[in-house]
Image: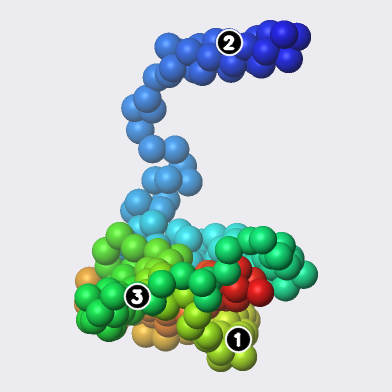
Amino acid sequence: MVKKAIALALILGLGLIFAALLLGYAPDAALNETAAYYATRTADEIGAQNIVTAIIVTYRGLDTLGEVTVLFLTAAIVGLVLSRTRAGDNAPRLSDLPPPGELLEIGTKLLVPLILLFGAYVFINGHLTPGGGFQGGAILASAILLMLLTDPLRRSSHRLISRIESSAGLFYVVIGVLGAALAGGFLDNRILPLGEFGALFSAGAIPVIYALIGLKVGAEFSSMMVSLSETEDE
């Protein structure tokens, strides 16, 4: 009873806080100094049509590196935990499941290449349209998930996934260091020509950076799902 009263009091307190914030909210009449700088200078300085991409990949590139590192550590921890996990004797095994139907197998063979192509499209065009490396990488990993759902006993190469993840991370850092050495700072995209604004080959090194992020994120998500699938069958 006491626990329920405390939980109710916390919920009511949070409700009052959010209600005060909502009732007292007043939108800004103009952009603040930082936002105004991004809005007016991104096209000239970065050459990216998508301002959000320019901010994530260049202006706050170190922060993005931290996010990718956190995701890598998460994948590593999940893999470590799952490698030490064993199902009980009475737990159902993937090998006990009925085989997938022919329709599911054919549908997977048709959809997986399209999903991979769409994922690559999302992160390659991240400097032009909404999307980017994180979204494209998640789409790539969804293709691996579909294959695992179709055939839970499928075994993927951990070595290949690891090489893709580590190589993408290494080249990401290399580009960042080149930006600091040859341009204006870490992950400065102007180590390559900015090109024509709005064109596919524009915004300097941003398409390359996003491609590396997409491969790295896709490999990390895939590694977690493959580890989970193998653990469930042990």
Q: Name the residue that disc number 3 marks.
A: 100
- Residue depicted at 41% across the width and 72% down the height: 98
- Residue depicted at 27% across the width and 83% down the height: 109
* Element marked by disc 1: helix
Q: Which of 133 and 52 is in front in this view?
A: 133
Q: Name the residue that disc number 2 marks.
A: 12
The amino acid type of the residue labelled 1 equals His
The amino acid type of the residue labelled 2 equals Leu
Cα separation, mark 2 vs mark 3, equals: 49 Å
Q: Position of residue 124 (x, y in %)?
A: 33, 77
* Element marked by disc 3: loop
Q: Name the residue that disc number 1 marks.
A: 158
Q: In which quarter of the image is the N terminus?
A: top right
Which quarter of the figure has residue 140? bottom left
* Element marked by disc 2: helix
Cα separation, mark 1 vs mark 3, equals: 24 Å
Q: Position of residue 95 (x, y in %)?
A: 53, 76
